Amino acid sequence: SSRGRCEFGRPIPEDRRQLDGAPMDNDPPFVKEIDAKAAKGDEACKAAAICLQVLRSVICSNLAKPSATAYFAGAVAALQKPGTPVATVSALLLVLRKAIPAASPAAVSARLNDLALAITGVLRNPDDEGLIKQSLSSLMAAADAVYGGGGRPNRKVLKPVFAFLGDQRSGIRHQAELTAMMIIKKAAAGGDQQSLDFATQHLVQMIACGRTNKKDVDEVPAKHALTLVRACGPVLPVANLVALIEELLKLPGLIGQHPVC
């Protein structure tokens, strides 16, 4: 029958005959979870399930297995397309966040540049708090997967994370802090000195911005840098810790306070 063939007439096995994007028995667990939640009325999962239908059709048309890696690659490719509506981007990010830990670390590492490029494109819309938090969560999951596979994330992943550490919106700032903490701790455990040096340099710059006339302390970059230093200081190499301490010792003078002798 026509349902047993892809669009170019090539025969495909029974377990791949899902050109209409309907759920498949051999879909990965995270896909089944999204579909199940969508069936129960979860609005975010409903939107994600629609994206999964499209991705599933593409996977089938390429005669590929509906693996977590295939869905991951499809979501990354879809996010790179310009002009995608915000609602669709949000749904794709949900799929991406679920697909990353389910895909192989090697696959995530291989597509890391594409993923970072796609996320950078999403972050060009800085007014949408939800998209930013989802993007940071995706970068966190990607970095975790790369480190888990023995690799190291590059600066394309690190830069957007640290760029939001001083964001005035508490939800975004908190997600950026969680992501940065994870990266720093994983980098220390894995001997990723390049990432540690990048993080240290950025934190030093934030501490140096201690002097401010802003009334709201949450807008002071040095405050957020201190949060990370307290959390990650114990795992930092001595050289990186010394650089941070030297800058911290300048902080009282920067904010107009002097120790009492």
Image: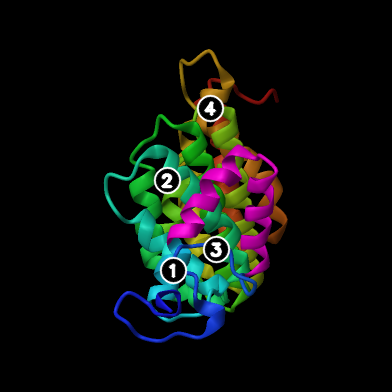
Residue 153 visible here: no
Question: Which residue is labeled 4 in the image?
Answer: 169
Q: Earlier in the sequence, mark 4 or mark 1?
A: 1
Q: Nearer the viewer, residue 23 or 180?
A: 23
Residue placed under numbered mark 3 in the picture? 143
What residue is drawn where x is 37% and y is 66%?
Answer: 113
The answer to whether one can see residue 17 in this image is: yes
Q: CA distance from mark 2 to mark 3?
A: 20 Å
**Tag 4 and tag 1, C-beta contact below 8 Å:** no
Asked whether the residues under the numbered discs 3 and 1 touch, taking CB atoms below 8 Å apart as contact, a structural biologist would say no
How far across and how far down the image is residue 60, in percent?
Answer: 44, 74
Q: Which residue is mark 2?
A: 89
Residue at 30% of width from left, 54% of height from top?
Answer: 81
Labels 2 and 3: the sequence-earlier one:
2
Disc ID at residue 121: none
Quickly name the residue at label 1.
19
As for residue 221 lying within the magenta part, the answer is no
The answer for how far apart the CA atoms under marks 3 and 1 are is 33 Å
**Between 130 and 232, which is closer to the camera in this rendering?**
130
At mark 1, the secondary structure is loop
**Is label 3 in a helix, a strand or a loop?**
helix
Residue 160 locus on image (x, y percent): 43, 48
Amino acid type at circle 1 is Leu
Residue at the image point whose x is 38% and y is 45% from the top? 122
Say left or right for 205 vs 133: left
For the residue carrying disc 2, how many other residues have a C-alpha within 10 Å: few (<14), some (14-19), or many (20+)? Answer: many
Distance of mark 2 from mark 4, alpha carbons? 21 Å
Of pointers 2 and 4, the one earlier in the residue sequence: 2
Comparing labels 1 and 2, the label whose residue is closer to the camera:
1
